[in-house]
Amino acid sequence: MLSPFSHLWRNLVHRDQIERDLDEEVQAHVELLVDEKIRAGMNPHAARRAAALELGGVDAVKEQVREIRSGAIAEQFLQDIRYAARLLRRNPIFTLTATLSLAIGIGANTTIFTVANALLFRPPAGVVEPDRVVDIGVTRSPGGFNFNPSSYPNYLDIRERTTTLDGVYAYPLFPAAMSLGGAGNTIGAESVFGMAVTVNYFTVLGASPAAGRLFDAGDSEQPGASPIAVLSHAFWTRRFNKDLAIVGRTLTLNGHPFTVVGVAAEGFQGTGVRAGDLWVPTSMLATATSQGTGMLANRAGAWLLIGGRLKPRVSIPKATAEMDAIGRTLEREYPAQNRGARLLLLPSSPVPGNSVPVAAFLTLLMGIVSLVLVIACANLTGVLLARASARRREIAVRLAVGAGRARLMRQLFTETMMLFVLGGVGGLLLARGMTSLLVSRLPTLPFPVDVSLALDGRAIVFTTGLVLIAALLSGLAPALQASKADVVSTLKDDAQAPGRLRLRHAFVIAQVAFSILLVVVAGLFARALQRMGSMDPGFDSHGVELVALNLSEAGYTDATGPLFARELIDRVRGLPDVQSATLAAVLPGGFESLRLAGLTLPGVSSPNGPELFADWNIVEPGYFATLRIPLAGGRDFSGADRTGAQPVVIVGEGTARRLWPGKEAVGQYVLAHRGGPDPLTRALRVIGVARDPSYGTLFDGTTGLYVYVPLPQQYWSSMMIVARTKDGRRVIDEIRALVASMNSNLPIVRAQTAEDYTALGLMPQRVGVSVAGSLGLVGVLLTAIGTYGVTVYAVTRRTREIGIRIALGARRADVIGMILRQGLSLVLIGSIIGLTLAAAAGRLLATFLLGMPPIDPVTFAGAALLLAAVGLAACYVPARRASDIDAMEALRAD
Amino acid sequence: MGTHRTNLLQGTLDLLILKALGTGELHGLGVSRRIEHMTRGTFVVRPGSLFPALHRLEEAGWLVSTWQPSENNRRAKYYRLTKAGTRQLGTETAEWNRIALAIARALEA
């Protein structure tokens, strides 16, 4: 006796023998029946007929036996797959286009999902119970998206007062560049990125060390008392080759010794995407970075992002309410520093406080890539419907010989599924390529980030789900229609049900509509970028190169820094390929902005009077000339504007209009208030007015108010060499060599062209235009194929009718016109629907369009024309063929 | 008759096949004729029902089959009850009797 499993095994593996056995058994049965009838007195011929009648068809009986066998489903499935594979091999063009279009659609979706996964969904590595971790930030416009860092004193108060959080930690908004002086012996300067974090950082997050220990409550928070560092696993691997002996050794950071106490677990980088090389305690800020001890005592100095862990069973709304109350109290207690600053508590995200705009942008991209998948599916469904009608005869025959409808549907479905599986696999491969392409295309950020865009389990599950749903949606209609085939009428004649055709037309219309939507979206992004390009940004970044340095990394102070800076820039100006050069803390159009102090006018009541918060920049003479920013009045800084001399300022036109409406700004005085423990108010004399740069970006909310101060009067250690080169020559390497020759301990933080630097702000538009543009192209191509397909099909179907028309005297032009009208009417309906959708979509895009009207006539007309041209081309070929129909042959055929 | 109309009837067919094989091994046609004979012609089992049932019972381990020469000197597949099949015949007979009794009572009431 065989166990059920051995039956299954036998049925699946020894299929041929089982089949032979069954055949023989049924044949033997027939012979026995015949013998029986003959014995009963029938003649052999009648006996055989009676036997056949009683049996009711050898194949039907065999089919019924097959269906009850164990593993019948699996066997049928294998059979379906073999059958489907044969069909797909027989139509390589169809298989290739279908697979490729699905692969592009699925691959694009997987790529965007991978990005969304990394930025929004993936739990941070090495963090215990990440859903209890929250971000706390400062917002100056409640309800808005801004989520700003806070100061160390505010952090201490929050930590003190909260009752809903188990622990509150803080970490800097950006990793700070530090010079690493080698382990033990000095082997030249190397720039590393360090994060000054509170000593409870690791404990609150629940991080564990890969070696040694992490910071804990035992480490002192007294400024300067804990010269210790924890290395990131990646840095430990890259720089020290996972040497365990590094624990306990001393590293020189910015010239000061730090003892390595441990290495964080692999992948740990807190909750964000900013990837530091090492962590030092916040208390060591003054030692490890350029910022003076003042930063720790300065309540106005906003540089820390705050995070915390919810106490068990405390809800986010409760903690948010408490944080809001703490924020209001802090605002009351310290109005000068905290005016208008509310505290916001949100679930932790890799992009703290920005998950809403990031999610909005990714949703937009997801919408774009979904469109192309929908187009690909609609295209495939159209083709499948056509194939289903071409196969009606085959299907009717199979139904006639006893195949069940369910069985038949399953088989048709297997074919569709197989295409989708091929497309899915192709899509995953494509997604791998596209994600690495995406990473390589990202502009250089001013700090290292680690966004792991690996295709993880989540992405695979997403893709699988997507494939299944898409296959179900596009396979269902054709399978249902095909299996509904009526045996008798189909076998009798090949007439077409009109309903089937209407369905195919609907799919073509959908393709046209969605393609036009994609093209319009791409066009809008492109037009927005073009507008940005043609708009005079008020400065000229072309041919300008940037080299960023942090003077404090080589130990320069407020006293020695300005002198070195002046000598450095003089030497850069002396390089043969440099036309002009200057130093600047930031550049317009980038990621960074400085808010150094509030401004008031002399004589206006202060400190509670209206203060003006502007975007500050700290520059050397020649800034305006190098960036070709025209001065509207007054003069540039000069060597005379040094320490001890009258503090001077150059204001932007916007600031001038705001402070002295209708009056001459040059010669006026403005008061700059710096908060903190040693508040400082300086009267600055306006010596010039500069044109404001005009650029629109999504990420940095500029105030539109600019002020510039000279470096000698407002020392800043983190500066960029800004050099305009002669005839587009590259000077970065020469500047590198120059810096190394002047001070070998001064590392280059980064070097890039000014165009790359300003490209960052327009990243969403650039990504948008390339994603929507390339996918729009695919969509238009697919639509062309779809329109062509349905027109060819219509011509084939109407061959006889066209033949009659020609026989009755219709001219070629009439026939062409008739076919074109039919095809183009679909394109027209699709275009109208698509443009209506695009008008609605344009409104959703408005934030990304940099002030362009969402219903841009050029884009809309262009997209409509493009689709019309493509539709015309797709219909013309079959129309020409229709006009060549030979009347006699057409009427004789079939 | 169409024996696959309901589950009850399918169960009936299984029981009839097991019963038919209770007295010795038979080939498919033999089983069919034995059932006709036993039920005095009330049940005529068509091949389309018979063969799937035989194969199902064999897979369930209640029957075994062997190829043997038939009465007309051809090869035919003969089915025979296994020990488990005999047990199953006992169980199903008892079950059937219980149901038949219950229904008879219900109809008398």
Image (cartoon, coloured by chain):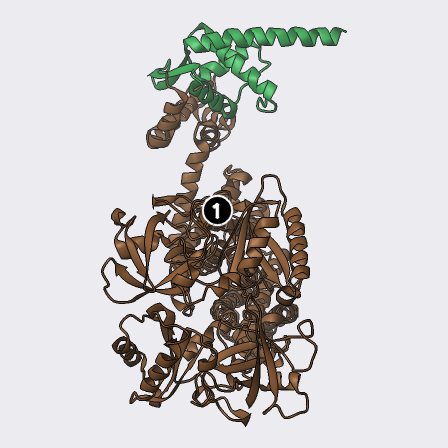
Tell me which amino acid carries mark 1.
Answer: Leu
The front one of A176 and A629 is: A176
Above or below — where is A830 with respect to A271? below
Label 1, residues with CA under 10 Å away: few <14, some 14-19, many ≥20 = many
The residue furthest right is B109
**Image side of residue A710 versus residue A512, left or right:** left
Q: In the figure, what tint was chain A given? A: brown
Residue A424: x and y, percent? 44, 52
Query: Does the rendering let one see residue A434?
Result: no
Q: Mark 1 points at which residue?
A: A205
Q: Which residue is drawn at 42% across and 89% down?
A: A639
Q: The green chain is which one?
A: B
Q: Residue at x 31, y 71 (%)?
A: A746
Residue A885: x and y, percent? 50, 72
The front one of A284 and A401 is: A284
* Chain of the residue displaying label 1: A
**Image side of residue A138 versus residue A720, left or right:** right
Residue A770: x and y, percent? 47, 70
The front one of A293 and A707 is: A293
SS for dot 1: helix
Query: Does the rendering let one see residue A641?
Result: yes
Above or below — where is B95 with respect to A628? above
Above or below — where is A713 with respect to A1? below
Residue B62: x and y, percent? 44, 14
Instruction: Say which quadrant the N terminus of chain A sits in.
Output: top left
Q: Which residue is drawn at 38% across and 62% down?
A: A193
Number of callouts: 1
Q: In which quarter of the image is residue A18?
A: top left
